Image (cartoon, rainbow, N blue to C red):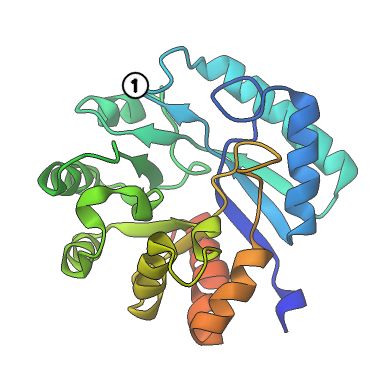
């Protein structure tokens, strides 16, 4: 059953030399091979955009992503690479999207958004609401990191009701019995409050591409239908630019 699932990783830092992810093409190639071994067949490259990556160069990033895409297609004909950005929220970020300085996810209306881990809930809510009001479909990156949302199930529900989609990093399911982050992600999973699981990979070591490893753990925590919704149905709808 599980072998028939081919995964899409919607949050990666696999393009070399454009942020704090892959340092060079050699590291990128190793990351791609790790991703392929994890069953990943579609990679969304999402280099950081905004305050945490002030030297980001759009043209350089696009050229580097094309180089990665060409190499991937030559080595793995059943694998593809698309491009977006991980947007660090600031008041002018939507203007940057409108002007084409920042990118949506593969040209869809979906956008991957992050905040400071110490950001207050009202600021996160209002920031994401701004995307929704402008017609975008915001995906809140690695929700397990934000201090104001930890153990706040009702606050997460309010974000989902607003039109926000929730992404969890795959490795967050791999902690031990007493790991607080794993316990919180399990709670979100049980309550149907996760829309996407992604690797947020940056390198080949501690932040390497993983997916199948986490999916196996998720299948121990919830029913297969819930997992399939997250790792298959939702990513297909994203690529088709459909509402989830």
Q: Out of 96 and 39, give the one closest to the viewer.
A: 39
Residue at the outermost front position: 178
Tell me residue 205's x, y (percent): 68, 41
Q: Residue at x 50, y 70 (%)?
A: 230
Determine whether, in the image, residue 4 is placed left or right of residue 45. right
Residue 219, compared with residue 123, is above or below; it is below
Mark 1 lies on a secondary structure that is loop
Q: Out of 147 and 27, give the one closest to the viewer.
A: 147
Residue 226, compared with residue 200, is above or below; it is below
Residue at which label 1 appears: 51
Residue at the outermost left position: 122
Tell me residue 108's x, y (percent): 45, 47
Q: Residue at x 28, y 33 (%)?
A: 89
Look at the image and tell me whether residue 244 can be seen: no
Residue at the outermost right position: 75
Tell me residue 38's x, y (percent): 73, 59
Q: Out of 106 and 202, give the one closest to the viewer.
A: 202
Determine whether, in the image, residue 105 is placed left or right of residue 51. right
Look at the image and tell me whether residue 229 can be seen: yes
Q: Residue at x 80, y 57 (%)?
A: 37
Determine whether, in the image, residue 157 is placed left or right of residue 229. left
Tell me residue 121's x, y (percent): 15, 49
Mark 1 is surrounded, within 10 Å at the Cα level, by few (under 14), some (14 to 19) or many (20 or more) other residues, namely: few
Image quadrant where one finds the N terminus: bottom right
Determine whether, in the image, residue 206 is placed left or right of residue 24. left
Residue at the outermost top position: 55
């Amino acid at each position: 059953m599980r072998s028939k699932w081919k995964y899409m990783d919607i949050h990666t830092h696999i393009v070399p030399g454009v942020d704090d992810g892959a340092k060079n093409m050699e590291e990128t190639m190793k990351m791609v091979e790790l991703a392929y071994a994890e069953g990943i067949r579609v990679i969304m490259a999402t280099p950081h955009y905004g305050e945490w990556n002030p030297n980001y160069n759009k043209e350089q990033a696009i050229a580097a992503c094309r180089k990665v895409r060409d190499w991937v297609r030559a080595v793995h004909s059943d694998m593809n690479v698309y491009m977006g950005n991980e947007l660090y929220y600031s008041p002018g970020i939507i203007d940057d999207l409108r002007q084409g300085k920042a990118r949506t996810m593969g040209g869809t209306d979906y956008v991957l958004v992050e905040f400071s881990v110490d950001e207050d809930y009202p600021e996160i809510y209002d920031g994401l609401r701004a995307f929704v009001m402008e017609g975008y479909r915001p995906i809140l990156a690695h929700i397990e990191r934000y201090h104001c949302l930890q153990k706040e199930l009702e606050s997460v529900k309010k974000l989902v009701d607003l039109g926000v989609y929730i992404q969890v990093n795959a490795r967050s399911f791999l902690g031990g019995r007493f790991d607080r982050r794993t316990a919180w992600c399990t709670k979100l999973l049980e309550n149907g409050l996760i829309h996407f699981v992604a690797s947020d990979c940056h390198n080949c070591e501690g932040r390497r591409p993983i997916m199948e490893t986490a999916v196996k753990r998720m299948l121990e925590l919830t029913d297969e239908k819930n997992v399939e919704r997250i790792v298959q149905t939702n990513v297909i709808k994203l690529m088709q630019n459909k509402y989830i």
